[in-house]
Amino acid sequence: MRWSQLFIPTLRENPAEAEVISHQLLLRAGYIRPLAAGLYSYLPLAQRSLRKIAEIIREEMDAIGAQEFYLPELHPAEIWQESSRWEAMGDNMFRLKDRWGREMCLGMTEEEVMTSIARAEVRSYKQLPQIWYQIQTKFRDEPRPKSGLLRVREFTMKDSYSFDLDEAGLDVSYQKHHRAYCRIFDRCGLQYLVVEAHSGAMGGSQSHEFMIPSDAGEDWIAVCPNGDYAANVEKAQSAAVPPAAADPQINAAPEPFATPSRKTIAEVAEFVGLPESSQIKSLVMVAGSKPVLVLLRGDHQLSEAKLASALGSEVRPAHSEEIRQWFGASAGSLGPVGVSNMEILADEALRGRKNMICGANKDDFHLRYVTPGRDFEARYLDLRAAAAGDGCVRCGSALELKKCIEIGHIFKLGYKYSESMGARVLTADGQEKTVIMGSYGIGLERILTSAVEQGHDKDGMCLPAALAPFDLVITPVNISDVSQRQAAENLYADCRAAGLDVLLDDRDERPGVKFKDADLIGIPWRVNIGRKLAQGMVEIVERRSRQSRDVPLPGAAGQIQRLRAEAVK
Ligand SMILES: [Zn+2]
């Protein structure tokens, strides 16, 4: 391709609306343009990268025996109603009606469609296992689209689904995906972590996420510096650090005291002169339509995902009117003593504590000397989100929290869809058996975004060779010099013959402009054709390291081929 004929609309300035690096650079380098909130047009450079990503994914999925489908993204409501996700997806789902008034939606994932095919066509255990995948557009009516391609309303996913006869079969399909994902992300040149993940409110037994540590991310993981434990904070287990002050060891009954206008844990801590860890934090949550009182140590945070898992249902914080109705007090003055109209759940870190402080269920009053097990009964569970400094459950070292971008997720679904939608096969002895499923996703734009987040400098992107829209750019320093122009054309032809994705910068621009643009769009190698041509030499500059070497013009294409093979192996 010749730069003079390509559409690469680079920008000089950082676009004001872009906060994260990948968003800034994808705009500046002419990869993407916004259409509306959370909707982007992919210009030719982005499209070339995304095709390369798709091809890597396709090769590795095919290598584990997965078969590619292409499914509609416009779905009838009925299949989502069968799985009960029509309701559960709420406002996140794009819904519409066709001309006859039939309800439809835009696909968020394809469990329902794949399961509807399996139940109609897969009838015998002899047809199992199956792994089916597609690379397709997905829709999500994101309330706050942001960060460029990271939180959007339309995106591309590889989603696959496995169908097996039993759990042992599902284990095999799951491990195949685990290995395929590692190969995909290795080949994409990404530095990633595999972490244990929350497996959802609706069951599911095992789940891992593939995470890119990055400040642009929106997921947090807890990771042990020894490398023996990493998990999403939603799910991470950890040993809490001891309370900042020891409990008073006196025998005293709960005693109300006035705390005028002190509503938060921090305000009460300051007022009483004791650390936050001496308080019980009381949160009113609603699971389905049932309220539940959740207790945590004052300095701890609730993991809504752990609570949802424990209750087997989605949860939400109660509204202030509901709290007033159930407790006769407002959120800043709540506690467990005397509560009998709802279940009380307490985090494990409250077990064995004595003489703590909590709300009195009377506005502007708290209780002191409250002891769990004596003054109230609760069911104890692990409910808190892991925090930095907590002990690793494997080795006791202090955990670190890292912000991450999730690029892939593998998930043992179990029987949720096959049971609700009736996907069954006949076994060898003629019995009907429900199939067991897994689901596995990869976000293609997130791979590109993560590659930019991990590979950039002040001048632009440094994309991994496997993902870059071109392998190399040939830059004749002075296009009006006939011998430079001819040498560039010859090398361009050599590179094409060698199967390289080559871009020839044939624009009549100053060398500084050409070098700047090449750096910005992130092509791994630049071949400068300038004064040294008189000695038959050209200069190869590696984008990421800025290292340069002079090579003879006739061997330059072969040299790039070797460098590329080394980089993408
Ligand atoms: Zn550890």
Image (cartoon, grey):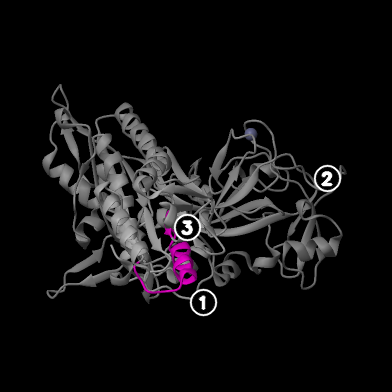
Quote the CA–CA distance across marks 3 and 2. 50 Å
Depth check, mark 3 against mark 1: the one in front is 1
Quote the CA–CA distance across marks 2 and 1. 58 Å
Q: Is residue 194 magenta?
A: no
In the picture of the structure, the residue carrying the numbered disc 2 is 247
In the picture of the structure, the residue carrying the numbered disc 3 is 452
Q: Quadrant of the N terminus?
A: bottom left
Q: Give amino acid for label 2.
A: Asp
Q: Where is residue 204 in the image (x, y as percent from the top left)?
A: 39, 41
Q: Is residue 223 left or right of residue 524?
A: right
Q: Where is residue 74 in the image (x, y as percent from the top left)?
A: 20, 63
What residue span does the magenta drawing correspond to? 506-529
Asked if disc 3 is less than 8 Å from ligand 1, the answer is no
Is residue 356 visible to us here? yes
Q: Where is residue 321 in the image (x, y as percent from the top left)?
A: 56, 72
Asked which secondary structure carries label 3, the reply is: helix
Q: Earlier in the sequence, mark 2 or mark 1?
A: 1
Q: Is residue 375 left or right of residue 463?
A: right
Q: Earlier in the sequence, mark 3 or mark 1?
A: 1
